[in-house]
Image: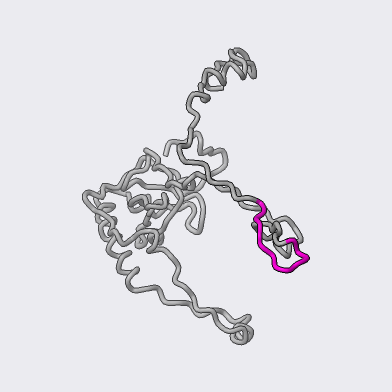
């Protein structure tokens, strides 16, 4: 009831019919200029041979299926909505220190670098300070603090995007190999040298900016937690 101001809870100024007429949706009915497709007849006349077959016969245009599914298969509802990346909160800018609230590194403080095309945030610990590597996090699970790291003109390499974090495809082993390997610990794969070099390159610029501010490295290293009687909605971060 956006156009009908409420006089009392649940009682609008206009009735439903009055509110609908004020919206004027009936004025904007879309009319199609395309010609209507020609209707195909349900039956067609076919010539049939034989003296006793009366020469012609009406045959259905489309054949009925021979088999039917035992149960009705539900068709998925088509949606006209296209997914769009979430807008970045105004409190989050490159260099903002964030507090992670979920995941493996919950409670850690990280530095925000940029927003990816998927809408996720690219953050780093840096790894040398608090052990948090380059990660993608959802902005719904972070607290933006007022502390900021001056990154200057530093820009993250364009190759570090959503595809960069995709898991490599694994080869499927045979059923016999899986049977004998059951119960054994899986061999740990070595961390790619290229990603390790990227982490060092990013952390080099971030650590240099962190060291310019006194006690900022200790702040990033300390984990966030609440004590008895502390409530996050009453705090200023």
The residues colored magenta run 42-54
Q: What residue appears at the point 37 percent right and 64 percent down from the top-left corner?
A: 164
Q: Is residue 40 visible?
A: yes
Count the marks: how many? 0
**Front-most of residues 25 and 58:** 58
**Front-most of residues 56 and 86:** 56
**Residue 57 magenta-highlighted:** no
Q: What residue appears at the point 63 percent right and 50 percent down from the top-left corner?
A: 41
Q: Is residue 110 visible?
A: no
Placement of 207 over or under 10, stated as above or below = below
**Residue 44 magenta-highlighted:** yes
Q: What residue appears at the point 33 percent right and 53 percent down from the top-left corner?
A: 217
Q: Which corner quadrant holds the C terminus? A: top left
Most distant residue in the front direction: 51
Q: Which quadrant of the figure has residue 59?
A: bottom right
Most distant residue in the left direction: 153
Q: Position of residue 174 (x, y in %)?
A: 58, 84
Q: Is residue 158 left or right of residue 84?
A: left
Placement of 45 over or under 90, stated as above or below = below
Q: Which quadrant of the figure has residue 44?
A: bottom right
Rendering colour mode:
one colour
Dominant secondary structure, magenta: loop
Q: Position of residue 10 (x, y in %)?
A: 64, 19
Q: Position of residue 136 (x, y in %)?
A: 42, 56
Q: Is residue 70 left or right of residue 230?
A: right
Q: Which corner quadrant holds the N terminus? A: top right
Q: Position of residue 8 (x, y in %)?
A: 62, 14
Q: What residue appears at the point 68 percent right and 60 percent down from the top-left corner?
A: 63
Q: Is residue 25 left or right of residue 50?
A: left
Placement of 91 over or under 10, stated as above or below = below
**Front-most of residues 80 and 160:** 80
């Amino acid at each position: 009831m956006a156009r009908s101001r409420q006089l009392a809870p649940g009682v609008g100024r206009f009735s439903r019919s009055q509110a609908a007429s004020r919206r004027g949706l009936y004025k904007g009915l879309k009319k199609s200029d395309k010609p209507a497709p020609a209707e195909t007849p349900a039956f067609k006349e076919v010539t049939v041979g034989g003296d006793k077959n009366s020469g012609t016969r009406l045959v259905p245009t489309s054949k009925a299926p021979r088999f039917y599914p035992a149960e009705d298969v539900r068709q998925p509802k088509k949606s006209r909505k296209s997914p769009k990346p979430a807008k970045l909160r105004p409190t989050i800018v490159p260099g903002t220190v964030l507090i992670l609230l979920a995941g493996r590194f919950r409670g850690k403080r990280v530095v925000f670098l940029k927003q990816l095309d998927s809408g996720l945030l690219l953050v780093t610990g840096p790894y040398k300070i608090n052990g948090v590597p380059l990660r993608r996090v959802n902005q719904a699970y972070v607290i933006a603090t007022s502390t900021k790291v001056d990154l200057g003109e530093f820009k993250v390499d364009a190759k570090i995007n959503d595809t960069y974090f995709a898991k490599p495809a694994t080869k499927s082993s045979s059923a016999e190999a899986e049977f004998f390997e059951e119960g054994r610990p899986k061999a740990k794969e070595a961390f790619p040298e290229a990603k390790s070099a990227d982490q060092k390159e990013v952390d080099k610029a971030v650590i240099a900016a962190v060291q310019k501010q006194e006690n900022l490295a200790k702040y990033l290293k300390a984990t966030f937690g609440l004590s008895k009687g502390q409530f996050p909605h009453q705090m200023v971060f």
